[in-house]
Image: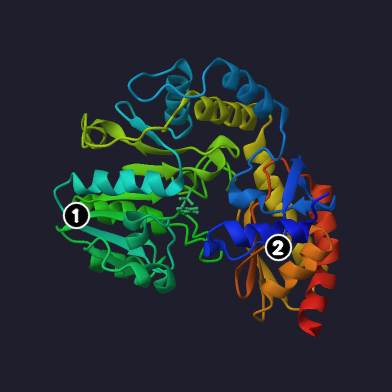
């Protein structure tokens, strides 16, 4: 049998090195656990980075995708399918989108952002205001909105007209937005930045500022959407109506799919026939997966469950008074545990060695984005072991 380390040698000899060499070779999963090729089990608290909303091997997803794969995987966008139409209708419903709203389907988060950027261009303005530390993807359009210099600079010049202002700073936003601004693009919670939630009224103020300037408000729900924060979408906590949102990660439960929702008839008319497209977007397989995910979240009450589990995690960590842990931030099941020192990478290695997958999203924070079906006992197992992980990371 080929071992983990043999596979990794073959990986580094064959796969482009943009991800470095990953530490483990995973073989299969079940619920909130995954197994590597050596047969070791891990508690998966990252969920494929907020993707495996239903965990691994969920019967509803397996059944829907298996049925669909036998019927029709792909038909192109020269045609449509009942599943694609149903998924569009369901997304409009859960987004609370007004009459005249529409859905565009792509295959990833970055591709949803590209659609949103082209949507913004159709306002006939070219300025885009994004936030410092924002992450919107790696394709060249989305990359211009992403803030991290190490991601952007090797590929400049990128799309012109983009400025970044401090996140959660209403005055900076007001100052940056004018009659040349096509759109303000914001994450409701900044995921890659380390799970940073803004003040309660930030998105409301952003809505007022963009409306007054005649600019679009585009909310990147790629990480926060599909129940991750305990509501269908992060913007819904603020009670606003955006002009467009982008969706991806959780929607297919692991099957690649992305989408942009345009809110209301005016914005939905900006992109017309022939102005945008994609080969795979919204194909029957991805649509079946998306429908299974939405139906399961609804039927199993996973929005409320995500809120409960997120609160449980935060309370349990607080009550444990773990050395070097200063708190838990985030919303629902998008959380970061924050340390008083840059030990997150060491904590993640210690956790992995003990069979727990967590993500060192920032030097002083680990990110948890477990499947929405996670149980309190599984979170408790992790919190009980966290002091040991911290001890190992700080004694090294
Ligand atoms: C992951 C992510 C993206 C990019 O999605 P990809 O599917 O990796 O292209 C964009 N925005 C946010 C907020 C994300 O979390």
- Please give the name of the residue rendered at 69% of the width and 53% of the height, measured from the top-left corner: 311
- Please give the name of the residue rendered at 50% of the width and 27% of the height, measured from the top-left corner: 287
Residue 38 drawn at (x, y percent): 83, 53
340 vs 115, nearest the viewer: 115
Residue 192 drawn at (x, y percent): 52, 62
Q: Is residue 82 above or below residue 336?
A: above
Colour pattern: rainbow
- Please give the name of the residue rendered at 60% of the width and 17% of the height, measured from the top-left corner: 70
Q: Is residue 246 above or below residue 96?
A: below
Point out the tag, 2 or 1, that comes first from the N-terminus: 2
The residue labelled by disc 1 is: 213
Marks 2 and 1 sit apart, C-alpha to C-alpha, by: 48 Å
- Please give the name of the residue rendered at 34% of the width and 65% of the height, measured from the top-left corner: 170
Residue 289 drawn at (x, y percent): 57, 29
The residue labelled by disc 2 is: 23
- Tag 2 secondary structure: loop
- Disc number lying in front (2 or 1): 2
Q: Is residue 25 above or below residue 254?
A: below
- Tag 1 secondary structure: helix
258 vs 304, nearest the viewer: 258
Q: Are marks 2 and 1 in contact (CB under 8 Å)?
A: no
Identify the image quadrant of the C terminus: bottom right
Mark 1 crowdedness (10 Å alpha carbons): few <14, some 14-19, many ≥20: some
């Amino acid at each position: 049998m080929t071992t983990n380390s043999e596979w990794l040698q073959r990986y580094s000899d064959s796969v482009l090195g943009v991800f470095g060499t990953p530490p483990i070779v995973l073989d299969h999963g079940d619920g909130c656990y995954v197994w590597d090729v050596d047969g070791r089990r891990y508690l998966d608290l990252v969920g494929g980075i907020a993707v495996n909303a239903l965990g691994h091997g969920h019967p509803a997803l397996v059944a829907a995708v298996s049925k669909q794969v036998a019927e029709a995987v792909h038909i192109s966008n020269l045609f449509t399918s009942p599943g694609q139409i149903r998924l569009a209708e369901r997304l409009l419903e859960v987004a609370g989108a007004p009459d005249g709203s529409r859905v565009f389907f792509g295959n990833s988060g970055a591709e949803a952002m590209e659609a949103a950027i082209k949507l913004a261009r159709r306002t006939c303005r070219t300025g885009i205001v994004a936030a410092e530390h924002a992450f919107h993807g790696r394709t060249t359009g989305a990359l211009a909105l992403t803030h991290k210099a190490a991601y952007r600079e090797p590929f400049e010049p990128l799309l012109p007209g983009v400025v970044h202002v401090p996140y959660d700073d209403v005055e900076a936003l007001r100052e940056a937005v004018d009659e040349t601004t096509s759109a303000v693009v914001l994450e409701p919670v900044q995921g890659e930045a380390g799970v940073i939630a803004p003040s309660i009224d930030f998105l409301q103020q952003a809505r007022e500022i963009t409306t007054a300037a005649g600019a679009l408000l585009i909310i990147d729900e790629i990480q926060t959407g599909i129940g991750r924060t305990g509501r269908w979408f992060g913007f819904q906590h603020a009670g606003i109506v955006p002009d467009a949102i982008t969706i991806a990660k959780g929607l297919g439960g692991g099957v690649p799919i992305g989408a942009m929702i345009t809110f209301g008839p005016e914005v939905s008319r900006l992109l017309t026939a022939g102005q945008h497209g994609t080969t795979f977007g919204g194909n029957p397989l991805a649509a079946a997966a998306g429908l299974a995910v939405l139906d399961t979240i609804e039927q199993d009450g996973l929005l409320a469950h995500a809120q409960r589990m997120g609160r449980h995690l935060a309370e349990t960590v607080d009550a444990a008074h773990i050395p070097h842990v200063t708190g838990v931030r985030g919303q629902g099941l998008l959380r970061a545990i924050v340390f008083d020192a840059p030990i997150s990478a060491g904590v993640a290695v210690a956790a992995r060695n003990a069979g727990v997958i967590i993500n060192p999203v920032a030097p002083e924070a680990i990110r948890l984005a477990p499947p929405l079906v996670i149980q309190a006992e599984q979170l408790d197992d992790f919190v009980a072991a966290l002091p040991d992980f911290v001890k190992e990371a700080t004694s090294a």
